[in-house]
Amino acid sequence: MKGTPMGTLKPTLADLRAFVTVGELQSFAAAAKALHLSQPALSRRISHLEGLLDVRLFDRTTRSVELTQLGQRFLGQVRSVITDLDRSVVDLHDVAHIEAGDVTVGCVFSAVHHFLPGVIRSFREQHPHVLVRIIEEGADEVLASVKSGEADFALNYTGMQDPEVAFTPLLKERFVLACPVGHPLAKRRSVRWEEIVDYPYALVSHASRNRVLIDQALAEVTPLPRPVCEFRHISTLIGFVDNGLGVAIVPQLTLPRQPASVVGVPLEHPVISRTIGLTQRTGRSLSPAAAAFARLLTQASRATTRRGLRRSGVV
């Protein structure tokens, strides 16, 4: 091979691994055993590599094998490459089998507390070495995180009509009137929208997609009086009610779990609802870790329906 330009022929990975193994073990017999090769096959690989490089890598006698000066230098360079490659293969295997890696999930604020704690707990029990990142934002920001690739997928109620996003419905929930447990409307089976006018109430601000859903649905209905307060986040609305400041219009699943000092009464005439679903970028497959997390979220949504939230406003 002498005189062959290096740009024409390249050492194979098998050649380099054979060289590193012989160099570390200082024995052709031990290296052949470690590589599951015959000694003649191993010798051919070393000779092939030396021919490509046009240098002698080992000084051999019938009793010993020693690296030449150039061989020692080359071993230091190649060994790190082989080690990094082996580590990359192991890391990829771990990620593919959900033993390592990470998953990034977007979630609208109003669904975080209902779904994520239990799902994260179950996921951590099954895959303790996977890092879970949560992007909790408003609906538009969460949608943008999916479209940009920042989030693997998201739990959202927008994106159904977006061609860049695949939307998988999980459940539909109604908007309810959040009341303190001692409020005159708290034990009602339902409340008509016009009945709210008799009580101070709060809404999310126009910056929220939830407000857009409410305003669109009520466009043909007698306008409600102005709320006494507006907040950017549903969780703040719940606190408003819990402190006895009034009632509030919220999605059903945002209510505190039992026992709670705040209850939800379904609103009707009209019934307003939103569909919660999983969103992911169109044409993008999920990693094994993300797919496992998505399955747990899907199971949690089914469990939510089975627990009877249908009677409380989830339809």
Image (cartoon, rainbow, N blue to C red):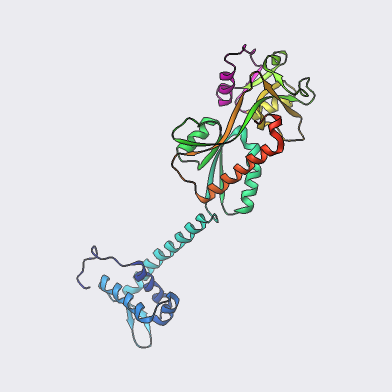
Residue nearest the observer in this picture, 302 or 138: 302
**Image quadrant for the C terminus?**
top right
Is the residue 219 above or below the residue 168 in the image? above
Quadrant in which residue 241 is drawn: top right
Decide if residue 261 is on the left or right side of residue 254: right
User: Which residues fall within the magenta stretch?
Assistant: 205-233
Residue nearest the observer in this picture, 126 or 314: 314
Decide if residue 2 is on the left or right side of residue 28: left
- The residue under the point 50% across, 49% down is 287
- Position in image of residue 260 (x %, y %): 76, 32
75 within the magenta span: no
**Image quadrant for the N terminus?**
bottom left
Is the residue 274 above or below the residue 87 in the image? above
- Position in image of residue 259 (x %, y %): 77, 35
Could you tell me how many numbered marks the image carries? 0
Decide if residue 32 is on the left or right side of residue 215: left
Query: For the view shown, which residue lies furthest in the right direction?
Result: 182
Query: For the view shown, which residue lies furthest in the left direction?
Result: 3
- Position in image of residue 127 (x %, y %): 59, 53
- The residue under the point 55% across, 34% down is 156
Decide if residue 58 is on the left or right side of residue 6: right
Is the residue 145 above or below the residue 40 in the image? above
Residue nearest the observer in this picture, 282 or 239: 282
- The residue under the point 68% across, 32% down is 310
Quadrant in which residue 76 is drawn: bottom left
Is the residue 160 above or below the residue 74 in the image? above
206 within the magenta span: yes
- Position in image of residue 297 (x %, y %): 60, 42
Residue nearest the observer in this picture, 52 or 56: 52
